[in-house]
Image (cartoon, coloured by chain):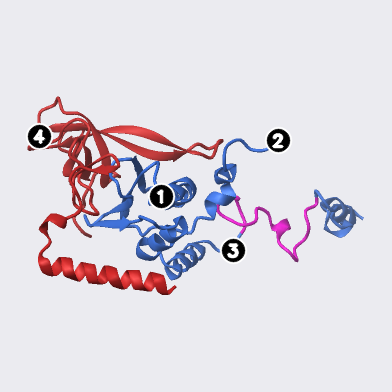
Chain colours: A blue, B red
Amino acid sequence: MPMKGRFPIRRTLQYLSQGDVIFKSSVKVMTVNYNTAGEPSEGARKFVFFNVPQIQYKNPWVQIMLFKNMTPSPFLRFYLDTGEQVLVDVEDKNNKEITEHIKKILGKSKETLEKEEREKKKLSHPATFGPKKYHLRECMCEIEGQVPCPAVVPLPKEMRGKYKTMKKEA
Amino acid sequence: MSVPRGAVHAKWIVGKVIGTKMQKTAKVRVSRLVLDPYLLKFFNKRKTYFAHDPLQQCVVGDIVLLKALPERRSKHVKHELAEIVFKVGNVIDPITGKPCAGTRFLENLSDSENLTEADTTYLSEKLQELKVCSTEK
């Protein structure tokens, strides 16, 4: 049973998480003005259809507004926290070119992203174990080189308390 | 720390004015894209904000940019009008700066009436060059 819709792959988590445009923290609002008909607006239409869901998924706190058929020329407009506005003309541009352009001007660079990842990793120690939310492993039995879980593999006789007490009595 | 601005989360917002019946206050509807967890599709979710508009220059239907106030002005008003992005009935295309309506410009874009003699000769020369290049190919 296939998925419903024109390009249902747009509605998969894998596709959404493949978006590589992550805006800087100063970008608050993104406005896309495009036309529903016309050759110059074709790239903008494809951008809205394919790439805007990816961008919104990666930047949940950026307000994205779409305006149709308001002006003859298609453009993107970003409102930054400093009050600055960035106008991007997308007439006669491919949707891939549009994403590359905004990634270059307002996206977080790869170094910044890697640095943030490293900072996040530093907070949690990988060797500890505990609740799944905070640690990688829940029980000591999951760690390689440690005694396996007695629910899966029975413990040897010498480690069982029953055997130890029997030996003490005898 | 810089000026602690915004007792609200949303610092800058773009929305459409839906009501101006209050004195010096505009009711603005803001739509955000929210992901439906099952369909994995984005839908518009609307929310209304009240914005302080001291000059009462907003008309219903304007697209406006709101800025969060440093502290709440009243129980509901936490934003003020920063600028009117598109005035209803008077949309200015930001790329060309000319008034437009829908997908067409309202005024004639070409400026052939204001060309001088030198301009026309220069342009016709350029046109000749272009014609030669196309025939060469």
Q: Given the image, on which type of amino acid does mark 1 rest?
A: Glu
Q: Mark 4 points at which residue?
A: B56
Which quadrant holds residue A126?
bottom right
Residue A13 location in percent, x, y?
57, 47
Question: Is residue A135 located in the magenta-colored stretch of the structure?
Answer: yes
Distance in Å between CA atoms under marks 1 and 4: 40 Å
Q: Which of marks 2 and 1 is nearer the N terminus?
A: 2
CB under 8 Å between callouts 3 and 1?
A: no
Count neighbours of disc 4 (C-alpha within 10 A) and say few if under 14, some if 14 to 19, many if 20 or more.
some
Quadrant location, the C terminus of chain B:
bottom left
Which quadrant holds residue B60?
top left
Placement of A159 over or under B134, stated as above or below: above
Distance in Å between CA atoms under marks 4 and 2: 56 Å
Question: Is residue B35 located in the magenta-colored stretch of the structure?
Answer: no
Q: Given the image, on which type of amino acid does mark 2 rest?
A: Met
Kindly state the secondary structure of the residue where label 3 is placed. Answer: loop
The one of B130 and A2 positioned closer to us in this rendering:
B130
Count neighbours of disc 1 (C-alpha within 10 A) and say few if under 14, some if 14 to 19, many if 20 or more.
few
CB under 8 Å between callouts 4 and 2?
A: no
Kindly state the secondary structure of the residue where label 1 is placed. Answer: loop
Tell me which segment is drawn in magenta: A129-150
Count neighbours of disc 3 (C-alpha within 10 A) and say few if under 14, some if 14 to 19, many if 20 or more.
few
Q: Which mark is residue A39?
A: 1
Q: Mark 3 points at which residue?
A: A126
Count neighbours of disc 2 (C-alpha within 10 A) and say few if under 14, some if 14 to 19, many if 20 or more.
few
Q: Given the image, on which type of amino acid does mark 3 rest?
A: Pro
The one of B47 and A151 positioned closer to us in this rendering:
B47
Question: Are marks 4 and 3 in one subunit?
Answer: no
Question: Are marks 1 and 4 in one subunit?
Answer: no
